[in-house]
Image (spheres, rainbow, N blue to C red):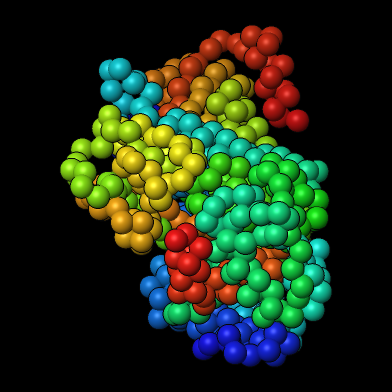
């Protein structure tokens, strides 16, 4: 009872999961192709090089998601009695780190370029027997690397919310970072074309602030989730209302006098313990089993709940229970 | 389209429209809705509107760039205006002595690359002024915008220049390779390892010889050396040497310009690409 069923996602969300998987495969394929394309037309433009490195880093979240989605539904084993759910949290940490590294790298590089007043040099190539400035070719290459990201990123956010998958959410942010930097690089290349040597680095620096901010907030959330923070929503630091809902449901059972509930996130799903003080101790086994059934019916995310009847809540528990109630 | 015969003033507009047309062709091909239809079927329905807006925004952007480019037309431009400074003014050429590409004799510059740049200057209606020096000196001069172009038989592997960190580097405009030749009535050999082979000076050719296992020896008069020499094929023929089957790897020749002067760089590259044959001819003349 209460032990994880496999797969963890309920039937009505399987379609969403399938779509998320498909989107991530698409992201992976498209990122890989953008990496190759950019490598072929890479000039010495600052934002061009960073756009490439950032596409390379952009491969990490889809890979993290696909690996996590492959393992997280495996049932518990003797060696992994809690199952493999937390691989999603680890995937989130990896993705968040990639996002942060990208932002920080971009910021440092472009500021350095501005300080050392480096003049970006862009050659020409011979195309159809004509000499064509490479900057012209960079624009469509960058547009190719930017536009799909806009849609991929926006398509992922609702899926991430439905699946409570923070890897997917971080990846959506990565896509946003991608099209922002590519856009900055296009502005930079056009600026260079107009003889503004600083346009490239300045555009990259502005954009990198936004990416670094996303990276830091995702990194922080990934770390506190791994530290068993109480569950939060995918897009922010707000406590998930599901915890209070579950506590209320348990407290409202007619045989329950008081409850101390704590939950933690294990990737997409929640694990936790509830200490309940029964007002009527008879038939306690059936009552506990019924409560657990109700809990897992409440939401698919309540994956693994242990319910322990106790005669009274210890002082510390009472205090935390009160805090949570407020 | 060839622009060689046109006057410098009239070239800008034409070639710019050329580039713009190529650019627009490439972008439109990349943005055909056909390639996006598959994407559209995966996206949730509410995103399709976004896709449409995105397409429109993209087209507007392309058209804006098109309008902008055809209006301005001297694209790309130089941050420090080198091309404008050279046109109908003076082209300051930094030269590093490297026979037969560049020579400084009694204050007069000559050599294949020097002649080539004189033609370029003439085309731009500019005077030339030569600044002799060493590579580090002239790279610094380029950084400080004291010279407009730097030549000295540089190749795509020349240290200091080819990395593109100190100066902008043109694409390779000429490819050469040296051949080992032996004096007449001397037996030819096929394995260069351990052989003493004469070179004009210790430089890129000597390095390539060393890689082959040979021992490069610098001699004053290569054409009358009494030992195997490494030189261009036509030099060997002119000097009466017998070419062997030992060919050294190809060298790709480049010139350098100050960093970031993209308009100037592209103009120079365009000239060099259009004058490859002349460059080869000049090199033959200067080296025999």
Do we see residue B272 in this rendering? yes
Residue drawn at x 66%, y 71% as measured from the top left: B118
Position of the C terminus of chain A by quadrant:
top right
Location of residue A154 in the rendering, given as x and y in whole percent from the top left corner: 56, 61
Vertical position of residue B4 compared to residue A253: above or below: below
Vertical position of residue B237 compared to residue A209: above or below: below
Position of the N terminus of chain A by quadrant:
top left
* Quadrant of residue A252 within the rendered picture: top right
Vertical position of residue A79 compared to residue B225: above or below: above
Residue drawn at x 28%, y 18% as measured from the top left: A78
Is B234 placed left or right of A131 in the picture?
Answer: left
Residue drawn at x 64%, y 50% as measured from the top left: B96
All told, the count of numbered labels is 0
Q: Nearer the viewer, residue A274 or A109?
A: A109
Do we see residue A206 in this rendering? no
Location of residue B95 in the rendering, given as x and y in whole percent from the top left corner: 67, 54
Q: Nearer the viewer, residue A51 or A147?
A: A51
Is A280 placed left or right of B62 in the picture?
Answer: left
Location of residue A114 in the rendering, given as x and y in whole percent from the top left corner: 78, 48
């Amino acid at each position: 009872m209460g032990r994880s069923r496999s797969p963890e996602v309920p039937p009505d969300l399987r379609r969403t999961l399938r779509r998320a998987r498909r989107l991530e495969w698409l992201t992976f394929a498209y990122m890989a192709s953008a990496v190759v394309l950019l490598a072929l037309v890479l000039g010495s433009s600052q934002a061009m090089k960073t756009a490439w490195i950032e596409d390379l880093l952009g491969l990490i979240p889809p890979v993290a998601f696909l690996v996590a989605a492959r393992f997280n539904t495996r049932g518990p084993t003797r060696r992994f009695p809690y199952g493999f759910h937390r691989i999603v949290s680890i995937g989130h940490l990896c993705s968040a780190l990639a996002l942060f590294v990208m932002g920080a790298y971009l910021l440092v590089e472009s500021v350095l370029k501005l300080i050392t007043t480096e003049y970006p040099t862009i050659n020409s190539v011979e195309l159809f027997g004509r000499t064509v400035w490479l900057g012209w070719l960079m624009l469509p290459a960058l547009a190719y690397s930017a536009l799909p990201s806009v849609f991929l990123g926006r398509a992922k956010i609702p899926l991430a919310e439905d699946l409570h998958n923070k890897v997917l959410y971080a990846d959506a942010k990565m896509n946003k970072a991608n099209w922002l930097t590519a856009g900055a690089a296009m502005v930079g290349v056009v600026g260079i074309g107009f003889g503004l040597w600083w346009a490239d680095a300045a555009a990259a620096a502005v954009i990198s602030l936004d990416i670094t901010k996303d990276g830091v907030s995702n990194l922080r959330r990934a770390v506190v989730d791994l530290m068993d923070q109480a569950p939060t929503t995918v897009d922010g630091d707000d406590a998930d209302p599901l915890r209070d809902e579950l506590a209320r449901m348990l407290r409202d059972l007619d045989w329950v006098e008081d409850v101390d509930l704590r939950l933690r996130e294990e990737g997409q799903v929640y694990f936790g313990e509830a200490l309940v003080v029964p007002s009527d101790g008879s038939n306690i086994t059936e009552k506990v089993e019924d409560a657990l059934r109700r809990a897992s019916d409440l939401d698919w995310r309540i994956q693994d709940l242990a319910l322990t009847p106790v005669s009274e809540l210890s002082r510390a528990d009472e205090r935390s229970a009160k805090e949570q109630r407020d | 389209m060839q622009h060689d015969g046109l006057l410098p003033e009239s070239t800008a507009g034409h070639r710019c429209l050329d580039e713009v047309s190529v650019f627009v062709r490439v972008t439109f091909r990349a943005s055909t809705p056909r390639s996006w239809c598959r994407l559209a079927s995966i996206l949730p329905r509410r995103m399709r509107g976004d896709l449409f807006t995105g397409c429109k925004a993209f087209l507007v952007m392309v058209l804006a760039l098109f309008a902008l480019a055809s209006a301005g037309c001297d694209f790309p431009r130089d941050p420090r205006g080198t091309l404008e400074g050279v046109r109908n003014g003076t082209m300051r050429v930094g030269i590093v002595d490297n026979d037969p590409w560049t020579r400084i004799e009694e204050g007069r510059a000559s050599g294949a690359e020097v002649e080539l740049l004189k033609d370029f200057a003439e085309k731009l209606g500019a005077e030339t002024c030569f600044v002799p020096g060493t590579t580090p000196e002239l790279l610094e001069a380029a950084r400080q915008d004291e010279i407009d172009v730097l030549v000295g038989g540089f190749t795509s592997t020349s240290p200091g220049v080819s990395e593109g960190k100190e100066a902008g580097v043109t694409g390779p405009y000429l490819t050469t390779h040296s051949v080992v030749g032996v004096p007449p009535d001397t037996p030819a050999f096929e394995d260069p390892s351990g052989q003493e082979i004469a070179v004009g000076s210790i430089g890129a050719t000597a390095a390539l010889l060393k890689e082959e296992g040979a021992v490069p020896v610098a001699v004053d008069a290569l054409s009358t050396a009494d030992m195997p020499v490494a030189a261009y094929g036509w030099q060997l023929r002119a000097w009466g040497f017998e070419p062997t089957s030992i060919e050294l790897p190809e060298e790709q020749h480049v010139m350098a310009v100050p960093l970031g002067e993209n308009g100037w760089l592209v103009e120079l590259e365009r000239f060099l690409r259009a004058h490859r044959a002349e460059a080869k001819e000049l090199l033959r003349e200067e080296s025999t």
